[in-house]
Amino acid sequence: MRVYHGSIEIVDKPELRPPYRTLDYGSGFYTTTSCKQAEDWVLRRMREYKSAHGYVNTFEFDDTALQKLNCLIFHAPTEEWVDFVMQNRTQKGFSHDYDIVYGPVANDRVYAAFALYEGGLLNKQNLIAELKTYRLVDQYLFHTEAALQTLTFLEAKEVIK
């Protein structure tokens, strides 16, 4: 299966880097099955870093690893997904031992709904109902070195403003 990683640099050897901010599924290497989502991410990073170009890095993912490694899969927003994302985003020092985590991306629109939930203006069931009305893109987190071994770099496509 092809997966994509947007960056302002070519990433031919994925690494586990500590994040500079809290992320949906914790630290690791994030990809998506949507080339458009990866390109949108690149464009955002290019604006943030005032960079003239970025890259959509394409990888072949040996998805048989989903049966071999310790994986957590969310096919849609659920109570468990909300709890997991909230733990990663709000509990300082929270960590998990999954090799790979798959599920919906909590994009800007989703963050706004999460903020309403955090502020007590939405309960969990209403949050999930709200999120199910959105067309959510997916993401894979590769959280361990064993997970990174399932990726083979194919190409980097340059993105220009």
Image (cartoon, rainbow, N blue to C red):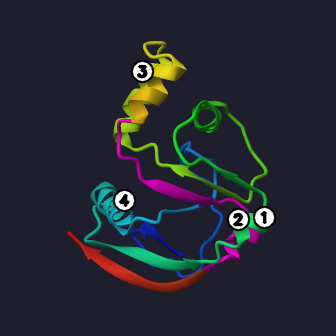
Looking at the image, which residue sits at the far bottom? 154
**Image check: 82 left or right of 110?**
right
Residue 73 on image: x %, y %? 64, 51
Residue type at numbered disc 4: Trp
**Image check: 50 left or right of 114?**
left
Q: Which residues are magenta?
A: 133-151
Q: Which residue is mark 2?
A: 66
Residue 128 on image: x %, y %? 48, 29
- Please identify, in this view, whether the residue under mark 1 or under mark 4 is nearer the observer: 1
Q: Which residue is mark 1?
A: 69
Q: Is tag 4's residue or tag 2's residue first in the polypeptide sequence? A: 4
The label number, if any, that marks residue 116 in the structure image:
3
Determine which quarter of the picture holds residue 111: top left
- Please identify, in this view, whether the residue under mark 3 or under mark 1 is nearer the observer: 1
Q: Nearer the viewer, residue 19 or 148?
A: 148
Residue 139 on image: x %, y %? 51, 56
C-alpha gap between disc 3 and disc 2: 33 Å
Determine which quarter of the picture holds residue 126: top left
C-alpha gap between disc 4 and disc 2: 25 Å
Q: SS class of the residue under badge 4?
A: helix
